[in-house]
Amino acid sequence: MRGIPKITGYFLSGMFLLSWVFVPGKSWAQVSDEFLNEAKKLAKLEDKLFHKRLKNDLEGTYEFQHPTYKEKISLEEFLYFEGRVVTGYRDGSMAHISGGMIPNLDFIKKNPRKRDALGFPRPFRYRWFLNPFIEVKRYSLDRISISEDGKYAMVEIVLKGRERLNPVLIRGDISFDMARPYVDYWEKVDGKWVITVLIDKSAISGGMKTLYFIPNNNDAWEKKEYVQIDPASLLADPDPERHALNGKH
């Protein structure tokens, strides 16, 4: 009889853990398989997107953007600002560049490629950060979080490479290894995952700085419950009961 309370305790603990990843109307196995399959898709998409950015393939990067974003920002604008432009850029802080006005849309559409100091067109460079002295070389996957309704996802990675101090300020050449957290926010639109929000978690102030925020209200992210999946579950045969975690972002 003494074993009954212990067995009951184990049973209740198990039910509590299962409730973390329970979605009404679906079995535990269905929920696990669906989330793991989506996480694998997102991991592949993130890898493709990373290498598009790394190779400065801005046209390829543009294809990953949200359809609402592409309605407001043309490919030429995306190329001109080298992948770092928000939908309302003419009304906000980007309305001036280095003290001058942003060129009109007609000029941008005719001249999407930036020019060097001598006036010659230069190759595109995807801008990971505002700091031009950061060179991204590779990344590691940290975590994939998918909302319980399957519509939103956050892919957390760590960008790695080299960072150099501004030589003008320090009058020297000092560089060091760089590792910065980075988050890509995805939304499923018509059955396809697309980029909808990008956040730089390592802003100079120490807080998170939103770079892209299209087209969702912040509540769409903050009030969601997420199933979090670690990279280990993507490398072997699925064992979701060991890897799926649930938590509010």
Image (tube, grey):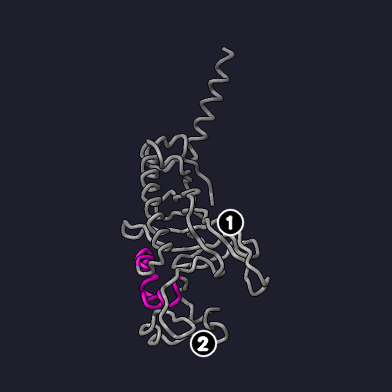
> Which element type, helix, strand or loop, lies under badge 2?
strand
User: At which x and y percent is residue 200?
Assistant: 54, 62
Q: In the current view of this chain or complex, which residue is farthest to the right?
A: 170
Can you say whether 141 is above or below 105 in the image? above
Residue at screen point 36% across, 57% down: 193
> Which element type, helix, strand or loop, lies under badge 1?
strand
Residue at screen point 41% across, 67% down: 56
Residue that badge 1 annotates: 177
Magenta stretch, main secondary structure class: helix
From the image, state whether disc 2 or disc 1 is nearer to you. Answer: 1
Residue that badge 2 annotates: 101
Q: Are marks 2 and 1 in contact (CB under 8 Å)?
A: no
User: At which x and y percent is residue 21?
Assistant: 46, 41
Q: In the current view of this chain or complex, which residue is farthest to the left?
A: 190
Q: In the current view of this chain or complex, which residue is farthest to the top?
A: 1
Residue type at mark 2: give it.
Met
Q: Give the range drawn in magenta.
A: 60-83
Can you say whether 3 is above or below 240 in the image? above
Categorize mark 2 by other alpha carbons within 10 Å: few (<14), some (14-19), many (20+). Answer: few
User: At which x and y percent is residue 47?
Assistant: 40, 54
Q: Residue 190 carries which label?
A: none
Image quarter in which the N terminus is found: top right
Residue at screen point 57% across, 20% down: 6
Left or right, 194 with reference to 128:
left
**Residue 53 occupies quadrant:** bottom left
User: At which x and y percent is residue 141?
Assistant: 48, 49
Q: Nearer the viewer, residue 241 or 142?
A: 142
